Image (cartoon, rainbow, N blue to C red):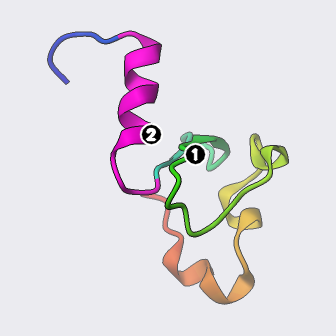
């Protein structure tokens, strides 16, 4: 990204774009996600800090990929 934006502007952008965004660290731990109104999958805040694979139904794990 070129330039810098405040955390408030970044959050506003994440909430405004009509897609679901989840942020996972290099250890596959969930850090955050956007609260967009059109979210298909609702998540409890207790998910923060958990392994991303532990937050998905077993039948969908093949769609969760860590690169």
Image marks 2 and 1: residues in contact by CB distance under 8 Å? yes
Q: Residue furthest bottom?
A: 59
- Dot 2 falls on a residue whose secondary structure is helix
Q: Main secondary structure of the magenta part?
A: helix
The span picked out in magenta is 6-20
Q: Which residue is painted at 46% across and 15% down in the image?
A: 7
The label on residue 15 is: 2
- The verdict on residue 15 being magenta is yes
Q: Residue at coordinates 56% horizontally, 69% vertically from top-left?
A: 40
Name the foreground residue: 24 vs 43.
43
Q: Is residue 64 left or right of residue 18?
A: right
The structure residue drawn at horizontal position 37% and vertical position 41%, both measured from the top left corner, is 16
The quadrant of the rendering that contains the C terminus is bottom left
Residue 45 lies in the magenta stretch: no
Mark 1 = which residue? 35
Q: Is residue 27 left or right of residue 11?
A: right
Decide: few, some or many residues near mark 2? Use Cα within 10 Å; few <14, some 14-19, many ≥20: some
Q: Earlier in the sequence, mark 2 or mark 1?
A: 2
Image quadrant assignment for residue 58: bottom right
What secondary structure is marked by label 1?
A: loop
Quadrant hosting residue 10: top left
Give the total number of marks visible in the rendering: 2
Q: Quadrant of the N terminus?
A: top left
Residue 30 location, x and y as percent? 65, 45
Which quarter of the figure has residue 12? top left
Frontmost residue, 57 versus 34: 34
Residue 21 percent across, percent down from the top left: 46, 50
Spatial distance from mark 2 to mark 1, Cα to Cα?
A: 6 Å
Task: Estimate how packed mark 1 is, as few (under 14), some (14 to 19) or many (20 or more) residues with alpha carbons within 10 Å.
Answer: some
Q: Is residue 30 above or below residue 65?
A: above
- Residue, x 75% and y 42% (percent of image)? 48
60 left or right, relative to 63: right
């Amino acid at each position: 990204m070129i330039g810098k934006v405040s955390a408030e502007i970044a959050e506003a952008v994440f909430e405004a774009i009509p897609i679901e965004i989840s942020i996972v660290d290099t250890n596959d731990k969930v850090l955050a996600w956007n609260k967009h109104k059109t979210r298909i999958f609702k998540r409890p805040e207790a998910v923060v800090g958990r392994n991303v694979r532990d937050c998905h139904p077993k039948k969908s794990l093949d769609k969760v990929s860590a690169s």
